[in-house]
Amino acid sequence: MRLRFRPEARLDILEARAWYEERAKGLGEEFTRSIDATAAGILRFPQAFPQVLGEIRKAVLRRFPYSLLFLIDGEDIVVLGCFHQRQDPRTWTERN
């Protein structure tokens, strides 16, 4: 399988990383490592993550209150976004 990030998802990640880096030097890099670890887990066992809306699945990051939302599309896994756990769900439901 192949993991693809939609442009909106990449922007979500960059914005969150910048926010964390502003709070403490190196924290943005830790956020990125958490994204990488979560993405690797998705690639290994995509169906292990719960469906939250239709075919959209949710993978919660460790240490950070964010989730990667993704779809399995044939041989591709498409990451729709990276959302804060307290963010209004309507924000991400509009992206599918």
Image: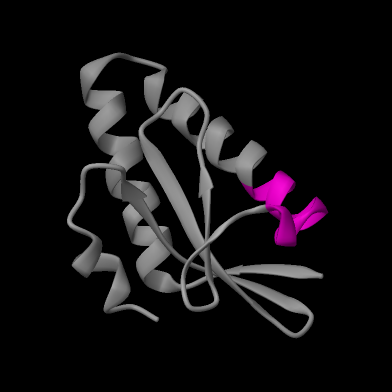
Residue 26: where, in percent of width, then height? 41, 17
The reply to whether the magenta stretch includes residue 73 is no
Relative image position of residue 68 (x, y in whole percent): 48, 53
In the image: residue 46, left or right of residue 20:
right
Q: Is residue 80 above or below residue 27?
A: below
Estimate the x, y position of residue 39 in percent, counting from the top left. 64, 49
Name the outermost residue toward the bottom. 74
Residue drawn 39% across the image and 20% down it: 27
Kindly identify the residue that appears in the image at 72 percent across and 46 percent down.
Answer: 40
Task: Decide which of 92, 16 is in the foreground and name it.
Answer: 92
Quadrant of image for the N terminus: bottom right
On-image quarter of the C terminus: bottom left
Image quarter for residue 8? bottom left
Magenta residue span: 39-48
What residue sits 46% from the left and 22% below the top?
63
- Is 41 covered by the magenta stretch? yes
Name the main secondary structure of what is drawn in magenta: helix
Apparent side of residue 17 relative to residue 88 in the rendered image (left or right): right
Q: Residue at x 39, y 49 (%)?
A: 13
